[in-house]
Amino acid sequence: TATYTIVFKTNAEFVGSGTDSTVSIELFGEDGAVSTGSVKLDQEFYDNFEPGRLDTFTTELKDVGLPLIVRIKLKHDTDAKDSLLCDFIKVSVNDQEATFPVCDWIYDEIEVTRGEVVRRLVKVKNIHLSSMIERELKKADAKFSWIPRPTENDIGWGFPRYVNAVTYKDLPDVFQRTKIRQLAQTTNKLESGIHLMLKQLESKVLHAHWKTSSLFITCTNERQSRLRMIWDTDEGMGRQVLNGISPLVLQKCSKLPNNLNVTNSDVLSSLAPGTTLETNMAAGKIYISDYSEMLEGAIRNIDPATKLPLHCANSIALFYSKPNEKFVPIAIQLVPGDRNYLFTPSSAEHDWLLAKMYYRCSQANAHEWLFHYSNTHSVSGTGGTALYKYFPKCHPVFKLLQPHLRTVEAINTDARATLLPEGSSTNKSMAISATSLARKAYKTFHHNDIVIPKLLKKQGTDDPELLPGYYYRDDAIAHWKIMEKYIRSVLSFYYKSGEDIISDFCLQTWAQGSVTEGIAWQDNNPRGFKSHILSLDELVEACTTIMFTSSVQHAAVNFGQFETYKYIPNSPFSMRLPPHKVGEGSMARIMNSLPDNGISNRSIAVSYTLSQYAPNEVYLGEFPDRLFVETEIEEIQEEYRKDLQELGKKIEKRNKDLQHKYTYLHPKNIPNSIAI
């Protein structure tokens, strides 16, 4: 026999994490064949396994050396079965210690291998360990099943596939929220937060004149006050397009599209003296934001008050990167191919102002349903389901990506019930149907749309010399490089050759299942996602894309929503009148075109709710769950933290000299995972 010390950590953050059931443990030796036998974990006259409790047990057991596997069993003392959420178990014997990261719910029985065993997963030779992994994967395959293939009447039609859960309560427990986050979202529903904000807004006296009042909600801080003062200027609009919450809508323009009817004479007064539209395009100083094809044919929603269609123009806009590093719009066309709807800064004041409102409405709809929901939430939800379904918890890729994917499906499930349906509060305030636009976009969606360095290069916006002041690009690329370095260092520790990657059954199953069942389930189109990973470079890019999308990119497009949408004329979700022709702009036309109080209230409520951080938010560089136990990996994580801290200092130094600071991608403002 030998004296074993067993430390058991019960989670404190989730409802029902403790247990009154009898808990027993069995330890299996290095070869996996010999065990200590099962022993009850109990301290007499002491309430063990309470939430947050760190319980220590010392017992004499058959000497199997430092265990490779632990098996935990719950014997339910009543007919009402409870469960236990364990963070980790530590086992010490003969001056040796092993940590077993559990981070999972125990209902009846669970088996866990010690943390450092992940390096053996490439070629598992221990038959007992292999058998344990097979049992775990079989359970995971059933527990994290894909939603049955949707039909045209289902909310999942035309989207990437997700976990089999129609409502939040259907989700596997590991995907559900912590107690603090539940409390923050009131009754655990996104809808409740929106309704709470609506009640607050409806209790206020709403102003009608946007020129002299804050329109619907008072600006309470300096940043919001500055927005109100400059929102209607060309520089104010250019800044928000370049560094706002939808910063990926620009492309360098070297040739005008056929449906944009602008001429050199239309914009000459907006360009630097001695230059033309053609010379500036050749110099890489003209950029285009084209929603014409993106929004064409997408279904417009109905105004709940008037029962008439809401409007959102298929806008096309040209922007100029001026020699003084200002970025400004120089032309907006609201109806492609028709010069009657072409406006420039030389147009009449109200014509130009209203054209900018229509363009910002186009941007708002594309932002919400494409760049925000589809390109972060939706694809990350598919990634989260696949991660839990195809990997054992002791796999290095699981440990690497789990912190960035666990919380996604909770908010996505709420979104499918609360935001996307036709009768939702959000859809009632948006001009374009969520499902119509997102389904249209997914038909042409490609993996490289979320590989940000490739996308910026393709769009021609990657050059700081040609396009200075693009702080989203600068910060996003810096994050990508830091994240890529971290991921490569971690994966290189486990994978020593391409053969290690090719022969990793779990890894290849994950790649194939993610594509065939998650991405291409409906039309067999892989959309650029790789169903086989053949090299370390491919694996690093895949993991970096997933981690970046669910953390950095989501922060970039999400947490500035309230700042952007709370002042309705700055960026309306919908317009009540169709686009105006040249000469039709007036103050009366503007007021009749802007959304009414009901739509505006919903816009503000939705954007406020979606912009909130949770009280217990976990940010980039934080690792509250110790999934990796190797000293080498912990050193890599520490290096990652230092890199993030240095980036934060650089951002702060840059922002000191900026009138409008870009803070969305400061590491301290980026949660690890999508949760709102």
Image (cartoon, rainbow, N blue to C red):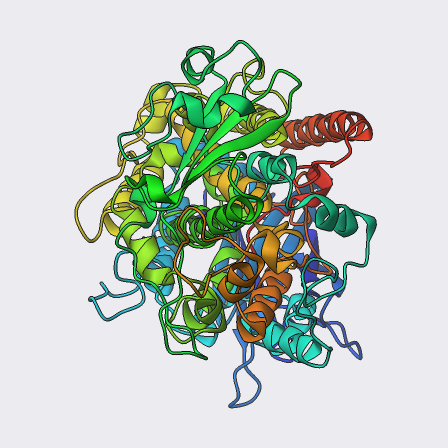
Observer-nearest of 591 and 5: 591
- The C terminus sits in image quarter: bottom right
Q: Is residue 145 visible?
A: no
From the viewer's perspective, tell me whether residue 472 is left or right of residue 395. right
In the image, residue 190 sits, relative to residue 272, either above or below, namely below
In the image, residue 596 sits, relative to residue 117, either above or below, namely below
Say which residue appears at 35% left-offset and 69% top-offset. 309
Residue furthest to the bottom in view is 79
Q: Position of residue 576 (x, y in %)?
A: 45, 66
Observer-nearest of 606 and 159: 606
Q: Position of residue 513 (x, y in %)?
A: 28, 46
Q: Quadrant of residue 339?
A: top left
Q: Is residue 74 visible?
A: yes
In the image, residue 418 sits, relative to residue 666, either above or below, namely below
- Image mark count: 0
From the viewer's perspective, tell me whether residue 471 is left or right of residue 414. right
Q: Quadrant of residue 328?
A: top right
Residue furthest to the left in view is 523
Say which residue appears at 36% left-offset and 56% top-offset. 135
Say which residue appears at 36% left-offset and 27% top-offset. 501
Q: Position of residue 144 (x, y in %)?
A: 37, 61
Q: Quadrant of residue 430?
A: bottom left
